[in-house]
Image: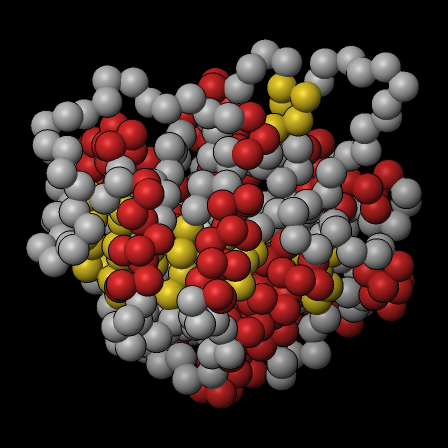
Amino acid sequence: MNFNDLGLIDPLLRALRSVEYTRPTPIQSQAIPQILKGKDLIGCAQTGTGKTAAFALPLLQRLYQSTQNRNRGVIRVLVLSPTRELAAQINDNFVAYGRHTGLKSQVIFGGVGQQPQIDGLRRGIDILVATPGRLLDLMNQGYVRLNTIETFVLDEADRMLDMGFIHDVRKVIAKLPTARQTLLFSATMPEAIQDLANSILIDPVRVEVTPQATTVEKIEQSVFFVEKQNKRALLEHLLEDRDIRRVLIFTRTKHGANKLAEQLDRAQIQAEAIHGNKSQTARERALANFKSGKTRVLVATDIAARGIDVDDVTHVINYDLPNEPESYVHRIGRTARAGASGIAYSFCDVEERAYLRDIEKLIRLSVPVAEQNPFASTIPLQVIQTHKPPVRGARDNNARPQQQNRNTSRSNNGAQTDRRPRRNHFRRRENAAS
């Protein structure tokens, strides 16, 4: 099957040829015909399976062919995304696929000045891609109205839940017209997301191209048992292999990401860090350097696990194992994009062995142990923690909601903030993620 077989119009086919897309992925071949028919849809697919094109292409076609197309400049499609990077990439895809249609799109997110975004909205757009926080801010200021929305797309719904945005999402949904097409995409379907889907979709078509929470088959996975004090030495040893051309390394904390990037730089290994505390300019610069190959290593926290869509990431390394097993799936999915193969290494110290056990239970396989490990742990593998290490407040980007102290809540970047009253101190809302 090729894209011609899906009934796409010539302006879209020309754009696809220019980006060298020839054959649709499974989720594209299943979702595009249903969305073209105007059906509500639940798309359950792993990261890297091409789901952005699965909704962007048919929505561009529906807008282009609509009799209302002559009245451009009215927002008719809203795409809600959890992170700045992902929102920007979705908008870039709309621009690339719609280059021959004359349709206009705009992305809005927090962490940057709002005036350029407001100016873009005033010029008139057909498609709005947004993160929840900035969208609600502009709605409250009267710059965005959603009464003309024909299609609503909720992307990375489970990540919205993880980052504490579901209440904001519900506020946005409350302002949408009842008569609309709704598309929900998620890598996993926890009960809360299924409940949300049941409340906002009408007789949806379900597209599930891979079993939930399984890892991409083309990723070669292995685990290195190593103690914490030897992790950096092991990493530098592995990076001596020049076949590791473009590597994404995940740490559990923002401080850890900064520290590791600095240490690698001192070892003459080009590295930059990206996480929620970085300014938007710094995040965009780090991502651009990584995409261009100027930077070989990008060190990230889970805020970036689903927001980095870079071709030819040869390796993903879990320097720290995530304490949410689902995050492992999203992290290693940054390699093996668009049908390519990839390699994922995971470092596991004695305190993280319980995390590894949970990951293997989720993905339903045992991660092979790396055979060549000059820094292998001498602690017997049978020594497994019966409890997980404590989560340390705002420094842990992966803390589950039920693990939070009752005096804490999540800020917009997924970190925890203290709700306990403080005298003579005003807290400002954090906009790191949206």
In terms of depth relative to the viewer, which is nearer, 186 or 71?
186
| Residue 21 higher or lower than 32, as above or below | below
Rendered location of residue 249, percent (x, y): 40, 56
Residue 56 location in percent, x, y? 54, 64
Q: Residue at x 16, y 47 (%)?
A: 376
Q: Is residue 352 left or right of residue 150?
A: left
**Quadrant where the image shows the N terminus:** bottom left
Q: Seen in the image, is 189 located left or right of residue 123?
A: left
* Residue drawn at (55%, 34%) of the image: 395
What x and y, as percent, mark residue 337?
35, 66
For this view, does 285 lie left or right of residue 24? right
Q: Nearer the viewer, residue 283 or 189?
A: 283
Q: Tell me where residue 357 sits by quadrant.
A: top left
Residue for point 70% across, 73% down:
103
In the rendered image, is residue 326 in sight? no
Q: Tell me if residue 260 can be seen.
A: yes
Which one is in front, 143 or 203?
143
Rendered view: 28 above or below 9? above
Above or below 158: residue 11: below
Q: How many marks?
A: 0
Q: Residue at x 36, y 43 (%)?
A: 320
Q: Nearer the viewer, residue 135 or 68?
A: 135
